[in-house]
Amino acid sequence: MNTYEEKLSLLSEMIAFARIDGKVNERELRFLNIVASQLRVEKNAFESLFSHPAEKKIIKSEHQRILQFYRLALLMHADGVLHDNEQVAIREMGINMGLSPYAMKGVLQEMQRSPSGLVDPEIMLALFKAQQN
């Protein structure tokens, strides 16, 4: 991740995604706070994104797009309820990021199979690399 504006854009996208089911619950908010902290976005700047979304920035690096897709997938599972509109939205967002629909489907299936809901990074990258061939 290169710029602070890109980080704000990613967080804005995640906040919008969390709102797809009509509300941001406590578990989703905690997850968003963790991501903001990892991205080194100040608390005030993060909180202001809820009322003033950042300008959308295009993620150039494929690795960063895959990482953002995975963050969105983790956020989707954070509240323990998988809404149909979340599943449709995450696929649309991934396609808009230029990611393989088959690889995204594989990652989401791996997450559902995993007791922790996490996917080993090597498995996730292998799913995306397999679609490049």
Image (spheres, helix red, strand yellow):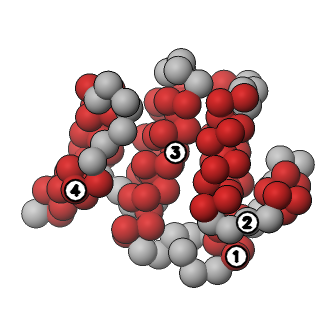
Residue beneath the point at 85% across and 52% down: 47
Give the alpha-carbon distance from disc 2 to disc 1, as whole Å.
8 Å
Q: Amino acid at mark 4?
A: Glu
**Which quarter of the figure has residue 79?**
top right
Q: Report the mark closest to the observer, 1 or 4.
A: 4
Q: Secondary structure at mark 1?
A: helix
How crowded pointer 3 is (Cα within 10 Å; few <14, some 14-19, many 20+) is rated as many
Q: CA distance from mark 3 to mark 2?
A: 18 Å
Amino acid under label 3? Leu
Q: Measured along the vertical axis of the image, is residue 106 above or below residue 8?
A: above
Which of label 2 and label 1 is nearer to you?
2
Residue that numbered label 1 is attached to: 4
Viewer-proximal residue among 2 and 43: 43
> Any mark on residue 122, and which?
4
Residue 86 percent coordinates (x, y): 54, 30
Are circles 1 and 3 on residues that touch, CB within 8 Å? no
Q: Which mark is residue 71?
A: none
Element type at mark 4: helix
Q: Amino acid at mark 2?
A: Val
Residue 49 percent across, percent down from the top left: 82, 54
Tally of numbered tags:
4
Q: Are marks 2 and 1 in contact (CB under 8 Å)?
A: yes
Q: Amino acid at mark 1?
A: Tyr
Q: Secondary structure at mark 3?
A: helix
